[in-house]
Image (spheres, rainbow, N blue to C red):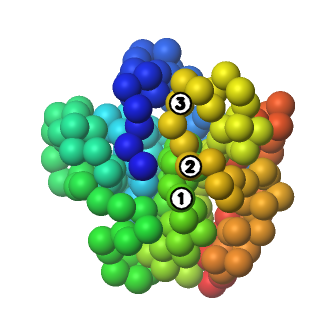
Amino acid sequence: MLLNTLEKALMNNPVRAALQRNYEAGRLLRMGGAMNGGRALEVGCGRGIGAGIILDRFGAERVDAFDLDPDMVRRARERLESRGAKARIWIGDATHIDAADGTYDAVFDFAIIHHISDWRAALREVHRVLRPGGRFYAEEVLASFIHHPLWSRLLEHPMEDRFDRPMFARGLEEAGLVVETSEELVGQFAWFVARKAA
């Protein structure tokens, strides 16, 4: 699902970028550690902030990233142009990832999967493209935020089959991933690190 105008503005500003770089990435790093090389994938890359974080803070050698929105893909390509072959960006769908089985050492989700109606299909795709032993770093928005009377009027999300923290953890496990750790903030946001069995 594409972001509406308000959410696109909220996601594409310096405050959001600073939060993602300093707080959200820091939390996932503390929970799951750095990559120290290897190949990563970001689902729903937006304007490319996350892909840069994956290279700079998580230490990926290379990052592939995609987004459903052609405008965001254009912005990400411009932002990451100086990275050369270290960053590859394309238009894509998280329920049908254009990559071979076992391609990635890590997959990153900076609050994208809650935008997907069939979020379980996206988790199955994450599992498919991870190599055995590969990690999935996820930051997600929970059902209580999505269904809040204010946010549900201002932001557009699928409203059916939304998840809380335990439900997302079950979805990860059903997809074949082992949840190593998860954390929650005020019942509205959650972070997960899961691994594909070796």
Residue appearing at x 58%, y 37% in the figure: 25
Between the C-alphas of marks 3 and 1, the distance is 15 Å
> In the rendered view, would you say 162 is above or below 99?
above
State the residue position of label 3.
155
Amino acid beneath label 1? Ser
Between the C-alphas of marks 3 and 2, the distance is 10 Å
> In the rendered view, would you say 105 is above or below 196?
above
Say if residue 196 shows up in the picture.
yes
**Closer-to-camera residue (169/114):** 114
The secondary structure type at the circle numbered 1 is: loop
Please tell me the numbered disc located at residue 158.
2
Q: Is residue 117 left or right of residue 88?
A: right
Q: Are marks 2 and 1 in contact (CB under 8 Å)?
A: yes
Q: Is residue 27 left or right of residue 39?
A: right
State the residue position of label 1.
117
Question: Residue 15, percent across and down?
Answer: 49, 15
